[in-house]
Image: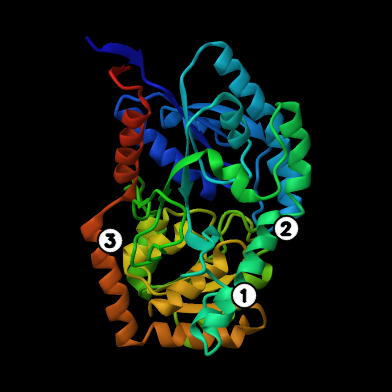
């Protein structure tokens, strides 16, 4: 006779702007609809959204509205302040005898500590491929080096030293040790030691975007881009604008970029130089009273819908925005700043679906030249249509991610036990 046990509650954990949390929210909603209990640990400011998705929610750090801060600032103001509330949540759950399964998106998340302390299974979601350090297929900025004339030497000698230094993380590891000592856990020297609790990993991107490397941590599966269908609508003002002026260039620096004055100044110059209409998306932009007949500003539009009306997307290269451009079959100019953005930009350019501007190469003149080429090239249009069709055929990655969670839940149940709600 098999015994029946309660399904583990699924704890989804992530720190960042809303763009970082949207995939976890969508995954949680899918799991709730399948009859699972889910609880999100994240920044303040998403509680109402979590509730609308059917998730429990515990804020563990302050709201993050700026994703252009340095790693040091992020650790100081968001990551480490989340540790004590996260540890307290797990203490309470363990005192209740609550079985848990942890799904997080970073080795710097405090859920790794709690999982190690209480022997909980942890599964990692990789929202983008940039943080997968591979000697076989390294991410930006090392990818170009392993394809050059000194590739073998670079891969064998230089790159391992670079990765070893990054794994020792002098800005993170020393500040982690007091929390480990408090929990009775031994000290660690590297980030991979923290990740020994991870039982499996899932990439929220397709293989054509980032082909899995033989030296990625295993087990590893790919779900594809998380592209939940929209339930929104476009304002009549925009529909009338597109009908009158034609398909616009859509400019958006992302919700977590507050310093937007120069970005939209250059956007305006680009539209004027090419004689094309433009749509500016940002809640931080203060549009002048006379923006012009061929330009429109909105604080927010449903990106999935607005890109169906666009000729080109110009953005900073967040993975969610990048994925939506592929889904719409729209070429993109990525003006990268930090984190996953440069790697995403370089991948988009390699795929022939856009241009990547970074550092000294990110000028008004470069933006105009890139936009002119991408809006007139038949070859680029064939490439973006190819990827649009590929995503249309494969669909949203969220259901596949939920399938993955359900498989690991079954594996997590002791032999002879049947899971029940």
Of the pair 56 and 184, the residue shown nearer to us:
184
| Mark 2 to mark 1 CA distance (whole Å) | 29 Å
Tell me the residue at 65%/26% (across/down).
87
Label 3: which secondary element: helix
Find residue 372 and report its image quarter. Answer: bottom left
Q: Position of residue 195 (x, y in %)?
A: 56, 44
What's the residue at 39%, 67% (across, down)? Answer: 241
Which of labels 1 and 3 is toward the front?
Answer: 1
* Label 1 environment density (alpha carbons within 10 Å; few <14, some 14–19, many ≥20): few
Across the whole image, how many numbered discs are drawn on residues? 3
Question: Residue at the spot x=38%, y=34% of the render?
Answer: 29
Q: Which comes before the other along the chain, label 1 or label 3?
A: 1
Kindly indicate whether the residue at mark 3 contacts the one at mark 2 (C-beta within 8 angstroms).
no
The structure residue drawn at horizontal position 22% and vertical position 9%, both measured from the top left corner, is: 1
Horizontally, residue 273 falls left or right of residue 236, namely right
Dot 2 or dot 1: first in sequence order is 2
Residue 394 can be seen in this image:
yes
Q: Which of the pair 276/359 is nearer the observer?
A: 359
Q: Quarter holding the C terminus?
A: top left
Q: Secondary structure at mark 1?
A: helix
Report x, y in % for residue 251: 51, 68
Badge 2 is on which residue? 70
Image vertical order of residue 237 relative to residue 414, above or below: below
**Location of residue 17 in the rendering, given as x and y in whole percent from the top left corner:** 59, 47
Gap between marks 2 and 3 measured at Cα: 33 Å
Nearer the observer: mark 2 or 1; the answer is 1
């Amino acid at each position: 006779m098999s015994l029946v046990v309660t399904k583990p509650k699924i704890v989804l954990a992530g720190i960042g702007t809303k763009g970082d949390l949207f995939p976890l929210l969508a995954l949680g909603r899918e799991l709730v609809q399948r009859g699972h209990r889910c609880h999100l640990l994240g920044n303040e400011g998403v509680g109402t959204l979590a509730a609308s998705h059917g998730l429990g929610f515990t804020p563990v750090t302050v709201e993050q509205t700026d994703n252009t801060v340095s790693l040091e600032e992020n650790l100081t103001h968001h990551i480490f302040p989340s540790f004590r509330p996260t540890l307290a949540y797990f203490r309470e759950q363990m005192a209740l005898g609550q079985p848990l399964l942890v799904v997080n998106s970073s080795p710097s998340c405090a859920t790794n500590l709690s999982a190690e302390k209480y022997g909980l299974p942890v599964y990692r979601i990789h929202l983008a491929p940039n943080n997968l350090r591979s000697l076989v297929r390294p991410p930006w900025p090392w990818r170009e080096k392993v394809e050059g004339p000194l590739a073998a030497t670079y891969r064998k000698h230089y790159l391992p030293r670079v990765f070893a230094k990054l794994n020792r993380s002098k800005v993170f590891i020393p500040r982690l040790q007091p929390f480990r000592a408090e929990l009775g856990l031994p000290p660690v020297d590297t980030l991979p030691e923290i990740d020994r609790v991870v039982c499996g990993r899932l990439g929220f991107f397709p293989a054509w975007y980032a082909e899995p490397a033989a030296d990625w941590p295993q087990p590893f599966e790919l779900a594809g881009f998380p592209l939940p269908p929209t339930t929104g609508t476009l304002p009549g003002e925009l529909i009338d604008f597109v009908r009158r002026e034609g398909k616009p260039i859509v400019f958006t620096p992302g919700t977590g970029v507050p310093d937007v004055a120069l970005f939209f100044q250059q956007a305006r110059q680009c539209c004027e130089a090419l004689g094309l209409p433009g749509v500016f998306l940002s809640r931080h932009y203060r549009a002048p009273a006379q923006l012009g007949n061929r330009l429109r500003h909105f604080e927010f539009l449903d990106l999935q819908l607005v890109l169906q009306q666009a000729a080109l997307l110009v953005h900073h290269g967040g993975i969610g925005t990048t994925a939506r451009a592929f889904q719409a079959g729209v070429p993109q100019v990525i003006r990268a700043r930090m984190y996953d953005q440069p790697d995403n930009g370089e991948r988009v350019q390699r795929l022939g679906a856009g241009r990547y501007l970074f550092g000294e190469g990110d000028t008004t003149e470069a933006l105009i030249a890139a936009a002119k080429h991408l809006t007139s090239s038949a070859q680029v249009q064939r490439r973006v249509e190819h990827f649009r069709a590929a995503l249309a055929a494969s669909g949203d990655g969220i259901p596949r991610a939920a399938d993955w969670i359900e498989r690991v839940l079954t594996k997590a149940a002791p032999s002879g036990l049947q899971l029940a709600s």
